C-alpha cells in the first residue's frame, strides 16, 4: 500500500485547531517520502514547482494548435482547458487537505488511488500511467533541450556539421548532474529561476511574432482550416489534445507533499500564482504566434522564426537559451516521481539521507535513469508524436478524470446538487477526449511514419 502519515486522535484534534495535520517524522515514512518529498516548503515554493511543471517550452506549440482549431475553436479550447484544469487541480488539493486534516497525509498520486479507490487502482492504473507520462516528459525534455542547443549552434555556425543526437547527449549530461539534486524541495530556487525564464522567452516569442506580423515583407496570412472535413475533425481533436497536454501537470500530489504542515489553503495560493503566469504566457504566445503565421505555424513557433532574416541572430540565440535553461528545470521536476520510486526501493529510511548506504544506490539509479532516457531521446528524436499519444492516454486521465472521481468518492456530493453532475460530465467528456485524442494521435504517427528513422537529424 502507498505511503500515508497516520496521526493519533489527540494529535489530529490539536492539529485541526491549528488548521492542519502534522506529518510524523522518520519511522512512519518510507525513504521516498522522507528523502525526496520532504515537507518543508511554503505556498510560494509550491507555486514555483507548479509553474515549472506546467509552463514549459511545450507552450510554444500553442500557435500550431490554434492553426488546426481556428480563432474561435482555439481561444475557446485555451479558456476551457485553463478553467477546467484549475478546477480539477483545486479539487485534488481539497481532497488531499481533507485527508491530511483527518489524520492521513497522502504523498503521491498512487497513494491517493490506493487509499480512496483501493490497492489495485494505485498499483495497476494510476501508478503505471503516472510513471509513463513523467518518464515520457523526461525523454521529451531531453529531445527539446537538444533541439534548442542545435538551434543555437546553427544560428552561430550555419556551416556546422554536428548532428542532433550529439546535442541531445550534451543536454543529457546536464540533466545527469541535475538529477542528483537530493529532493523536490531542493529545486525551489531552480524553479523560481524557471518561472522567470518562462516569462522571458514568452515575452521574446510574443515580441518576435508581433515584429514579423507587422513587417512589410511578411507573406499573406491564411487562417482557414485545411484538409477534408474528416481531416479537420481529427486535426481539431489533435489540437485539443495538444492544449490539454500543455496545461497538464500529473504530479500535483507530489508537489503538495512538499508543503510544510499545516497544508490547508496553501495549494490554492500556489495555483493562483501558477495560473497568473499561465495567463500571461499561454495566451500571449498562442495569439501572437497564430496571428503572425496563420495556418503556417509549425509544431514549435521557434521553427518559424529560424526561417526569417528579420530577426537578429543574437535574439534567436537568447530566446533559445532561455528555453534551454528552463527545459532543464522542467525535466528535473518530472524526474522526481522516478527518483522517489528509486529512493523508496533502494534507500534505508533509518539511515541518513547522505550516508554511503543511501548515496551509492541513489547515484547509480538516478544516473541509469537519465542515461536510458538520453539514449532513447537520441534514437527517437521524433518522440513528440509519441508524447501526444502519451498525453492523450496519460495526462488527461490523471488531470481531468481522477480528481473528479477522488472528490466524488471522498465527499459523496448529493446527486441533487450541481457539483456531482459537473464532475460526472467532466469525466464523461474527458473519457471521450481520451479515446478520440488517442486515435487522432495514432493517426498522426502513421502519417509521419515515413519520416521516422533512428538518430534522425531533425
Image (spheres, helix red, strand yellow):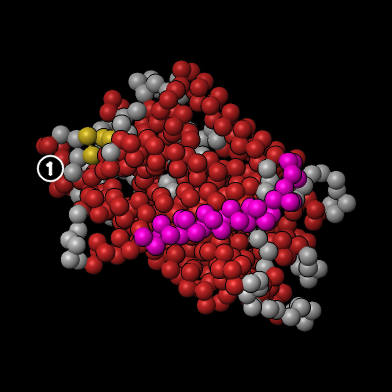
Residue at 64% over, 78% down: 224
Give the tally of numbered discs.
Answer: 1
Residue at 77% over, 47% down: 457
- Spot the residue most to the top: 357
Residue 296 in the image: state x and y as whole percent: 70, 70
Q: Is residue 170 magenta?
A: no
Q: Of 370 and 268, which appears nearest the observer?
A: 370
Q: Quadrant of residue 171?
A: top right
Q: Is residue 300 left or right of residue 398?
A: right
Q: Of 196 and 342, which appears nearest the observer?
A: 342
Q: In the rendered image, is residue 450 in sight?
A: yes
Q: Is residue 454 left or right of residue 67?
A: right
Q: Quadrant of residue 328?
A: top right
Prevailing secondary structure class for the magenta stretch in the rendered image: helix
Q: Secondary structure at mark 1?
A: helix
Residue 225 in the image: state x and y as whole percent: 63, 75
Q: Of 299 and 57, which appears nearest the observer?
A: 299
Crowd tier of the residue under label 1, counting other residues whose Cα lies within 10 Å: few below 14, some 14–19, many 20 or above: some
Residue 456 in the image: state x and y as whole percent: 75, 45
Residue 39's place in the image compared with 322, above or below, is above
Quadrant showing the N terminus: top left
Q: Of 344 and 458, which appears nearest the observer?
A: 458
Q: Which residue is mark 1?
A: 13
Residue 21 in the image: state x and y as whole percent: 22, 42
Residue segment shown in magenta: 428-456
Residue at 36% over, 31% down: 34
Residue 291's place in the image compared with 429, above or below, is below
Q: In the rendered image, is residue 145 in sight?
A: no
Q: Is residue 443 magenta?
A: yes
Q: Is residue 298 left or right of residue 263?
A: right
Residue at 29% over, 50% down: 406
Residue 38's place in the image compared with 360, above or below, is below
Amino acid at each position: 500500500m502507498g505511503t500515508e502519515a497516520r496521526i493519533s486522535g489527540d494529535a489530529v484534534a490539536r492539529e485541526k485547531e491549528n488548521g492542519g495535520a502534522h506529518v510524523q517524522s522518520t519511522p512512519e515514512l518510507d525513504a521516498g517520502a522522507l528523502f525526496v518529498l520532504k515537507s518543508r516548503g511554503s505556498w510560494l515554493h509550491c507555486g514555483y514547482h507548479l509553474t515549472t511543471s506546467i509552463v514549459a517550452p511545450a507552450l510554444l506549440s500553442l500557435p500550431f494548435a490554434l492553426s488546426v482549431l481556428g480563432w474561435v475553436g482555439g481561444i475557446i479550447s485555451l479558456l476551457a482547458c485553463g478553467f477546467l484544469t484549475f478546477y480539477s487541480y483545486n479539487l485534488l488539493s481539497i481532497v488531499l487537505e481533507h485527508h491530511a486534516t483527518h489524520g492521513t497525509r497522502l504523498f503521491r498520486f498512487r497513494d491517493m488511488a490506493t487509499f480512496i479507490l483501493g490497492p489495485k487502482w494505485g498499483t495497476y492504473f494510476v501508478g503505471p500511467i503516472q510513471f509513463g507520462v513523467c518518464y515520457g516528459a523526461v525523454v521529451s525534455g531531453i529531445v527539446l533541450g537538444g533541439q534548442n542547443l542545435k538551434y543555437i549552434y546553427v544560428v552561430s555556425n550555419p556551416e556546422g556539421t554536428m548532428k542532433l543526437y550529439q546535442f541531445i547527449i550534451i543536454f543529457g549530461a546536464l540533466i545527469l548532474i541535475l538529477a542528483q539534486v537530493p529532493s523536490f524541495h531542493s529545486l525551489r530556487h531552480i524553479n523560481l529561476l524557471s518561472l522567470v525564464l518562462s516569462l522571458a522567452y514568452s515575452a521574446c516569442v510574443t515580441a518576435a511574432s508581433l515584429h514579423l506580423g507587422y513587417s512589410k515583407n511578411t507573406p499573406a496570412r491564411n487562417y482557414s482550416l485545411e484538409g477534408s472535413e474528416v481531416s479537420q475533425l481529427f486535426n481539431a481533436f489533435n489540437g485539443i489534445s495538444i492544449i490539454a497536454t500543455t496545461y497538464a501537470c500529473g504530479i500535483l500530489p507530489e508537489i503538495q507533499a512538499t508543503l510544510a504542515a499545516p497544508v490547508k489553503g496553501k495549494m490554492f495560493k500556489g495555483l493562483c500564482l501558477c495560473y497568473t503566469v499561465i495567463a500571461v504566457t499561454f495566451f500571449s504566445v498562442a495569439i501572437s504566434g497564430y496571428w503572425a503565421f496563420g495556418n503556417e505555424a509549425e509544431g514549435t513557433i521557434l521553427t518559424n522564426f529560424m526561417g526569417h532574416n528579420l530577426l537578429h541572430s543574437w535574439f534567436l540565440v537568447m530566446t533559445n537559451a532561455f528555453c534551454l535553461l528552463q527545459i532543464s528545470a522542467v525535466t528535473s521536476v518530472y524526474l522526481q516521481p522516478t527518483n522517489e520510486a528509486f529512493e523508496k526501493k533502494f534507500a534505508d529510511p533509518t539511515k541518513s539521507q547522505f550516508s554511503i548506504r543511501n548515496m551509492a544506490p541513489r547515484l547509480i539509479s538516478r544516473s541509469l535513469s537519465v542515461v536510458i532516457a538520453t539514449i532513447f531521446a537520441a534514437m527517437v528524436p521524433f518522440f513528440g508524436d509519441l508524447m501526444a499519444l502519451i498525453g492523450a492516454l496519460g495526462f488527461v486521465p490523471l488531470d481531468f478524470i481522477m480528481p473528479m472521481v477522488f472528490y466524488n468518492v471522498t465527499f459523496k456530493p448529493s446527486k441533487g446538487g450541481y457539483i456531482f453532475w459537473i464532475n460526472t460530465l467532466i469525466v464523461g467528456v474527458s473519457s471521450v477526449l481520451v479515446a478520440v485524442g488517442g486515435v487522432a494521435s495514432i493517426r498522426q504517427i502513421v502519417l509521419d511514419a515515413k519520416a521516422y528513422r533512428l538518430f534522425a537529424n531533425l
